[in-house]
Amino acid sequence: MTDSQTPPEKPTTVPEPPPAAPAEPHKLSRGRRIWVWVLVVLASVIGLVTVLTVWVDRQMLSDSQWNKASAQIIQDPAIRSTLSVYLVDQLYNNVNVEQQLSKQLPTNLKPLAGPVSAALRQPATQAVDFLLSKPRVQQAFIKSSSVAHQKLVNVLENKTGYGISTGSGVVTVNLSELVKELGTQLGLPAGALNKLPANTGVFTVMKSDQLSAAQTGVRIIRVASVWLIFLVLFLYGLAIYLARGRRRETLRNIGWAFILVGLIVLVVRRGGGNYVIDALTKPTYRPAAHHLWIIASSILGDTGRSIVFYGLIAVLGAVLAGPMHLAVAARRSMAPMMAHRPGVSWGILGGLYLLLILWGPTYALTTWWGVLLFAALVALGFEALRRQTVREFPDAAFAGAAGMTASARALGARAAAHRPHRAASSPADEIARLHELHKAGALTDEEFAQLKAEALR
């Protein structure tokens, strides 16, 4: 075969290198992985106990919260109705209403004293309910409850003074004035009302033989409600520190632990409270007891919802830093701003955090220490995300409006490359066009290889 007959050699093509495989995550040793899980579980259990101590400290031992709850109690129709029945029962049990009415009726009507006193019982209950709806009477109830609470805290904290008698460790709520006012409304003579027993309308909150254990419990709660929070955060932080190479996954697991603890608190508040009330109260008083529990445990419910909120933020943050396609796309879009305008990025974060504080969805975000603590945690998380994003996309460019215009042109070119072209164009022309788009940066290596293979078919 002559040289003229020698077939032309096919151009050799250098195979494109395959895309680099993502680096495998650092594998923790079995022992360290166990320690990380032990710390997360231990912190979650202690966190559940912390929630209960914070609830008792903030709601049961706080004068302002107690007075707020007292106002809600006396304004609740179901509780007010039950209280009305209790006060009327106290009056009828300690005063011979039939005898007192008989003294005031004419001789020929005295036999009617019994039926009249029985008939007056239901209207008297309705009258007391109406009476308890009056602001003046409600303030008297709140004041009586406040005095009892101050006495209770005074005894539990082993304090003296403040003009409050501990009563040898016996703490009571005194509603005798309301009972006397009810008797006056029914027309009973003042002499009979003044002879009411001293314990009429008085019920005991705590007896002296319970004092020592209660005082010890309060001291523990006072300390635990503060320091257990720091212990929980320390244990979670230690778990993240030990999970080197798996810290994002550990943060995600901590977020789920937060959500689980919050849900347990909410379930216990509803289901556990209902079970205890049904077991300890008579059917007549259960509706009021349920309302009372909901009011008395309002902070417990708020705390449970707050923990779920914090857990969702932790999970979302871990997902945003993860390998999911949407998360990677989000980091790629934020990379130019984070790399070249970090001040603007921090400013946007600060603005969003300020809106969160103004919203105040949780109790901690309404206190100075909570705002500072949460700000520190958010700042640490954001800086870690920013550094990760800059490390993943080191070539991210930011050129203001011009850069965005160029990016728009590149996106348009990429869309055009994916559109089918006229059948008249040859494979060589199509490959040349794709090569120019790839060289201009409008197509990635993977897209260029895929479209070139389609053009050669």
Image (cartoon, grey):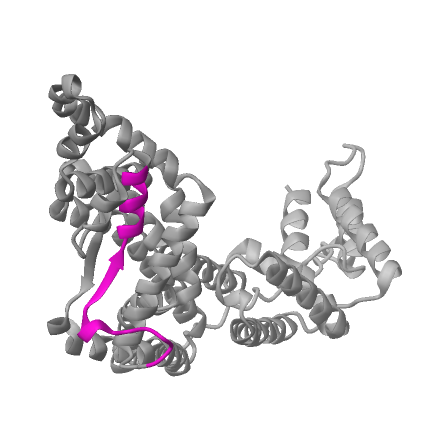
- Quadrant housing the C terminus: top right
Looking at the image, is 32 positioned above or below residue 351?
below
Magenta segment includes 181: yes
Q: Residue at x 19, y 56 (%)?
A: 203
Q: Residue furthest front?
A: 107
Viewer can see residue 262:
yes
Query: Measured from the top left, where is residue 197 in percent x and y?
Result: 16, 53
In this image, 281 relative to 331: left or right? left
In this image, 289 relative to 395: left or right? left
Looking at the image, is 68 positioned above or below residue 163?
above
- Quadrant housing the N terminus: bottom right
Looking at the image, is 433 positioned above or below residue 41?
above
Foreground: 15 or 394? 394
Query: Measured from the top left, where is residue 337 in percent x and y?
Result: 74, 67
| The residue stretch that appears in magenta | 161-184
Query: Which of the 4 quarters of the picture holds residue 265?
Result: bottom left
Query: Which of the 4 quarters of the picture holds residue 248?
Result: bottom left
Looking at the image, is 58 positioned above or below residue 161?
above
Q: Residue at x 32, y 61 (%)?
A: 261
